[in-house]
Amino acid sequence: MMSDVKQHTRTDSGEKRFGCEHCEYKARRLANLKEHVKIHSGEKPYVCDECDYRTVRLYNLKMHKRKHAGERYYSCDHCEYTTGQLRNLKVHRRRHTGERLYACARCDYAAVRLCDLRGHERTHSGARPYACDLCDYRASTGGHLREHRMAHSGERPHACDQCHYAAARLRDLRLHVRRHSGERPYACDQCDYTAVRLYNLKVHKRKHQATNAKPDCGAVLPCAPVARSKR
């Protein structure tokens, strides 16, 4: 009984005493840590009885079953996104507003979600706690590992509704769809160049930087005085 009281007190205080031995994750409760460790082991004990979906958490399974029931309560005002959870809608809206609450302490990276920041921070530390069970690949985030596993299975769940293209990653599909829509959201601030991808804009800007660094060969430079020798 006393141990339960201590556990409750530590939970209320926000103290995260239970650390994962595979990554930097910490939890307030031992039960949460045990649930987290399943991500590393690949264990997914909760199975949907209507499809092949499996998950680490019972709560995730309950949310998943809402999809089969057609329960989609919250809708975005800016696009067709809908979700059964208000918190998901709040996070989604940041993609439209550009709000990035979670900033990296080592560089200028900022993220919409805390989990994205944690994944990014591993690019600095080099930690790759998520291991593929089919090869020696290791990933810094669980999402990257899931995407990698599709390379083994050949699965491409994200299909374009305008052509035969299909992608393993949702972000690849979003980039592809811009080719149909003509959307080029990344604009150069020094000329009228626009790009589909942020990477392309960064490469383009290097051309401006290289041009600005070059000396102006057409400029007339003052001639240095010629010293005359005394005879």
Image (cartoon, helix red, strand yellow):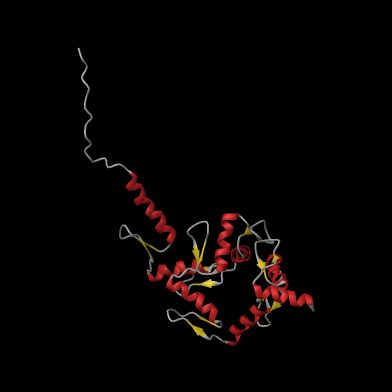
Residue 177, by quadrant, is bottom left
Percent x, y for residue 106? 52, 56
Q: Residue furthest right?
A: 1
Q: Nearer the viewer, residue 42 or 18?
A: 18
The residue at 60%/63% (across/down) is 141
For this view, does 124 lie left or right of residue 49?
left
Image-based side of 185 in relation to 226, left or right: right
Residue 196 position in % (x across, y down) = 41, 64
- 90 over 212 or under it: above or below: below
Residue at x-position 21% and y-position 34%: 222
Q: Is residue 212 visible?
A: yes
The x, y position of residue 160, in whole percent, is 48, 72
Determine the residue positioned at 33% across, 59% down: 189
Residue that protrudes farthest toward the top in the picture: 231
- Residue 83 or 228: which is nearer the viewer? 228
Q: Is residue 55 visible?
A: no
- Quadrant hosting residue 137: bottom right
Q: How many marks?
A: 0
- Quadrant containing the N terminus in the rendered view: bottom right
Residue 205 coordinates in the image, percent (x, y): 37, 54
- Looking at the figure, which quarter contains the C terminus? top left
